[in-house]
Amino acid sequence: MDLFGGTIRNLENGLSYATLKNKAISQNIANVDTPNYKTKEVSFKDVFNDVKKDSISAYRTDARHYDFKMEIGGNGVYSNNFRSRPNGNAVNMDAEQAKLAENTIYYNALIDRISSKFSTLNNVVKGGR
C-alpha cells in the first residue's frame, strides 16, 4: 500500500530527472571552450526506464489485446557528436542557455507542486488548524 498514492514518489523522480538534466547542461556550458568536447544530452525515455525496476508490460484482459513491453535503457545521458566549431567543440551556448532556462522552470514547477503536497499533508496532520 502506498500511503500517498505514488504522487510524492513521482514528483521525486521528476526532480531527479531535472537535476540530472541540469547537471548535463551545466557541464556543457562549463566546457564551451574545451576542444573536441561533445555535448551531453539527457533522454527522458532512458531516465524513465531506469526508474522502473522491471520492464513495463500491458495488462491484457483478452488474448486479442496487443501486448507491449518497455525495455530498461542506459543511464539516460548520451553524447551528441555534432561539431559546430573548427576546434571540434559541439556546444552551442545559446541553445544550452535556453535548455537551462526551460529546465529551471520545470524544476521550480515540480518544487512548487511537492511543496503544495507537503503543505496539504501538514494541514491534514494538524487537523485543519
Image (tube, helix red, strand yellow):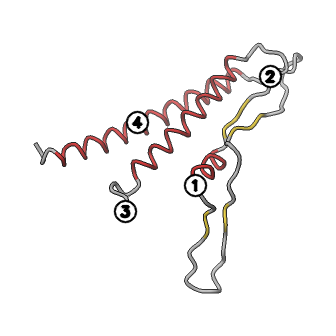
- Outermost residue, left side: 129
Q: Earlier in the sequence, mark 2 or mark 1?
A: 2
The image shows residue 18 at horizontal and vertical percentages of 54, 36
Residue on which the image places disc 4: 111
Mark number for residue 37? 2
Residue on which the image places disc 1: 52
Please tell me which residue is depicted at 75% across the width and 23% down the height of the picture: 91
Quarter-wise, where is residue 35 in the image? top right
3D distance between C-alphas at marks 2 and 1: 31 Å
Q: Earlier in the sequence, mark 1 or mark 4?
A: 1
Please tell me which residue is depicted at 61% across the width and 68% down the height of the picture: 57
SS under mark 1: loop
- Of 49 and 109, the residue lying toward us: 49
Please tell me which residue is depicted at 56% across the width and 40% down the height of the picture: 17
SS under mark 3: loop
Q: Amino acid at mark 3?
A: Met
Label pair 4/3, CB-CB below 8 angstroms:
no
Crowdedness near tag 4: few (<14), some (14–19) or many (≥20) residues, C-alpha within 10 Å = some
Q: Earlier in the sequence, mark 3 or mark 2?
A: 3
The image shows residue 92 at horizontal and vertical percentages of 73, 23
91 sits to left or right of 12: right
* Up/down of 3 relative to 116, above or below: below
Residue on which the image places disc 3: 1
Quarter-wise, where is residue 52 in the image? bottom right
- Outermost residue, right side: 86
- Which quadrant: the N terminus? bottom left
